[in-house]
Amino acid sequence: MSAPAASADSPFPDGTPDSAEAAARATRSLQGLSPELTSRVPQLLEAMRSVGTGLELHTTLDRICETAAELADAHYAAIGVVSEDGEGLSDFVYFGIDPETAERIGRLPDGHRGLLGALIHQPTTLRLADLSADPRSCGFPPHHPPMRSFLGVPIRVQGEIFGNLYLTEKRGGAEFNDYDVHMVRVLATEAGIAIGNARLYEAAKQRERWIDGSVAVTTALLSGSDAEEALAVVAEQARHLADSAAGIVLLPDEEGGMEIVAVSSDEPGGALGVIVPPESRIVSQLLEGQAVFIDDAATDPRVMTDLARHYGPVMMLPLQSDGRVLGTLVTPRARGGRPFSEAERTLAAQFASQAALALMMADAQRDRERLAVYEDRDRIARDLHDLVIQRLFATGMMLESAQRRSVVPEVQVGVGKAVDELDVTIQEIRTAIFALQQGPAEAPSGLRTRVLREINMAAVPLGFKPSHHFVGPVDTVVGELAGKNLIAALREALSNAFRHARAARIDVVVDSSVILPDGRQGVRLTVADDGVGIAEGGRRSGLKNLKRRAESLGGDSWYGPGIGEDGGGTTVVWQAPY
């Protein structure tokens, strides 16, 4: 049977009292009650004390369920947390059902139908002798334990419905009585206070995490990282903070769509380089600076990539600063994952704005550093041309004059060889000058030529030119995405050798005839030196970047002994499918 609605003189109306007032009224209402109810007051006070301890929200909900079951002498208890749109349950916490039974039952109630759905739209106290006899009941799924008696009480937090507390199957086969209703109502009032405190604490901790994440991104971006690494940092931090299955950064491409340029995920690579076509309605919204929120990417027709089938709720946030859209930050959760709350959406949007600002500042900083490098390279090129080459040329002319005047054949031959070596040296210096004066926009498209350009550029700070060797049709079989990442890996490896190795010899090999462990054809870059090797406990951020870049393409990277005596130095290997 159903309990009547609370009357005007009922001490526990389903109103919306303030938490302190509610507790006071609940306590005063116990005065003058029957001896049976009064005898249970110590148990109620202990239950209220137990519920009020702790600040973690989910732990608090677990404790409320257990305490309510003990207080009302029920086998089972649960709390259904009403979703933000008020149309279902966003969470369902239960007590009394063991993990094995819960696994056999399967999916938790969503509150869209049945008795639980009715209580969402009519949040009032409900007591039933046999819940299966209620016309609103839709039955139990297979393997669900039998339940007859039922007591449902709404939980309000600061005047708003948070959810409902459900108790079923009173021990001994009895029905829940009036005393149980009174006790559970008092407990529900205290639970509302405890939940409110836990939600405030959780919101504060959540804001703190997002702020710390924004600081970490800003620090990383302004520490001198290259563009690819900067975007990878944004993706990784967003994934961690949003508790999502992946963090993805997209940038506009030349065709009007958006390209995935950075991915942070536990899943194997394959997303990097994927293009979202301009025909997608989502792309136009994002390029206009609008955030897009998707409930289920796998079934949403607006998502036009095969990657969507792996994901459920998705946040797509424009990386926008000063009216300029730099790209998009995407944080998808796995299929069946909980939707993003309003608080999470707001915090994520603020994070994206901060990340966009940091990206612009980092880009400006890199431009300044790049300008300083170009100015320095121009100065070095001028000095090499105006001073070094002129002196070498003058020295060559002096040697040629001495050669003509000499009458000793051996001297003539030796001086001639010295003049030839000077001519070769002058040609190499002119090649270095050309490399120093060449801007990034002038970079040729052939992979072989780009590799040679990187080697020639590295020769200036190294003081010698690394040797090189190509295997296979490098220019014709290696695609643009793999080639672009190979050049970045080569630049990273040569930079590490210059800064740390103190090497006298570096060998570079690019092999496009490699068969990867999974059977695919790939390209392998090997950079070996005879330097000091990698010290124990030394920094390995550069090597980690190489490995992360390779894995994002479905490849791998590792290092081993070098080409020095007894394996001295380091050999870095980077490979990826093409």
Image (cartoon, rainbow, N blue to C red):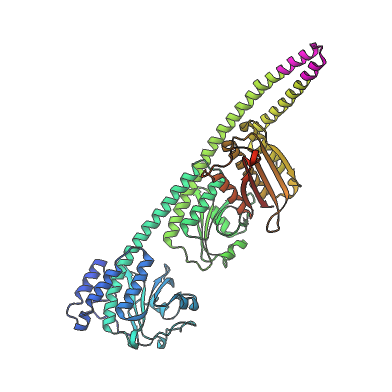
What residue sits 33% from the left and 77% below the top?
Answer: 69
Looking at the image, residue 365 sits to the left or right of residue 521; the answer is left
Q: Position of residue 244 (x, y in %)?
A: 50, 60
Magenta-highlighted residues? 395-415
**Quick check: is 377 in the magenta stretch?**
no
- Would residue 34 be visible to someone looking at this image? no
Q: Give how far across and how far down residue 514 sits, in percent.
A: 72, 51
Magenta part, dominant SS:
helix
Q: Residue 137 or 160: which is nearer the viewer? A: 137
Relative vertical location of residue 469 with respect to residue 290 in this rendering, above or below: above
Residue displayed at 68% across by 41% down: 508
- Name the residue located 34 percent from the left edge and 74 percent from the top edge: 66
Residue 44: quadrant of the picture: bottom left
Q: Which quadrant would the N terminus be assigned to in this image?
A: bottom left
- Residue at the far left in the pictured view: 32
Q: Is residue 542 above or below residue 414?
A: below
Quadrant position of residue 497: top right
Front residue (pair 433, 281): 433
> Which of the pair 12/40 is nearer the observer?
40
Residue 103 vertical position relative to residue 426 in the rendered view, above or below: below
Q: Judge left or right: residue 370 versus residue 37.
A: right
Residue sitting nearer the eye, 169 or 328: 169
| Visible residue check, residue 92 | yes
Taking the image as shown, residue 78 lies to the left or right of residue 324, namely: left
The residue shown at (21%, 80%) is: 39
Image coordinates of residue 110 in percent, x first then y, are 46, 74
Q: In the drawing, does residue 376 fall left or right of residue 400?
A: left
**What is the x, y in percent for residue 216?**
45, 48
Q: Is residue 403 magenta?
A: yes
Residue 346 lies, with reference to residue 441, above or below; the image says: below
